[in-house]
Amino acid sequence: MIGNEMNRARRLQQPADRESLRLAYERVLRLTDLTVEVAESRGLRRELLRWRDLIASLYLAAAPDAAEHDIAFRALLGLTPGSATQIALLFR
């Protein structure tokens, strides 16, 4: 679900979409918090919290930054082997 919201936010990088982008990042932050609460792996929780800081900085940024968003999205997908297979499909 976090990846779905990140993909949605990826399409909202135009200045006219700023409010929709902020709402998407809010959903990403909330979904990340919920995932951290239920994650059994301490290592995954730690990495998700570090990743959350990236999203928080994107949320607080004065202007959308598509390149930074893609870096954060790739980092998220790289956290698990299953989602890592999606990197090649999303970033051509």
Image (cartoon, rainbow, N blue to C red):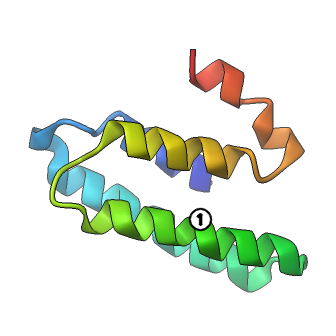
- Label 1, on which residue? 51
Q: Which of the 4 quarters of the picture holds residue 83?
A: top right
Q: Which of the 4 quarters of the picture holds residue 89?
A: top right
Residue that lies at the very extreme toward the left in this rendered image: 16
Vertical placement of 85 versus 63: above or below? above
Q: Is residue 88 left or right of residue 53?
A: right
How many numbered discs?
Answer: 1
Vertical placement of 46 versus 79: above or below? below
Location of residue 24 in the rendering, given as x and y in whole percent from the top left corner? 37, 56
The reply to whether residue 27 is in sight is no
Location of residue 70 in the rendering, given as x and y in whole percent from the top left corner? 48, 39
Residue depicted at x 59% and y 65%: 51
Location of residue 64 in the rendering, given as x and y in whole percent from the top left corner? 24, 47
Three-letter amino acid code of the residue under disc 1: Trp
Quadrant where the image shows the C terminus: top right
Q: Which sits in the foreground, 49 or 3?
A: 49
Q: Which sits in the foreground, 48 or 18?
A: 48
Q: Is residue 84 left or right of residue 6?
A: right
Residue depicted at x 78% and y 81%: 38
Residue depicted at x 72% and y 69%: 47
Quadrant where the image shows the N terminus: bottom right
The reply to whether residue 30 is in sight is yes
Vertical placement of 26 versus 15: above or below? below
Q: Is residue 89 left or right of residue 71?
A: right
Location of residue 76 in the rendering, given as x and y in whole percent from the top left corner? 65, 51
Crowdedness of circle 1 by 10 Å Cα count: few (<14), some, many (20+)?
Answer: some
Q: Which sits in the foreground, 68 or 6?
A: 68
Secondary element type, mark 1: helix
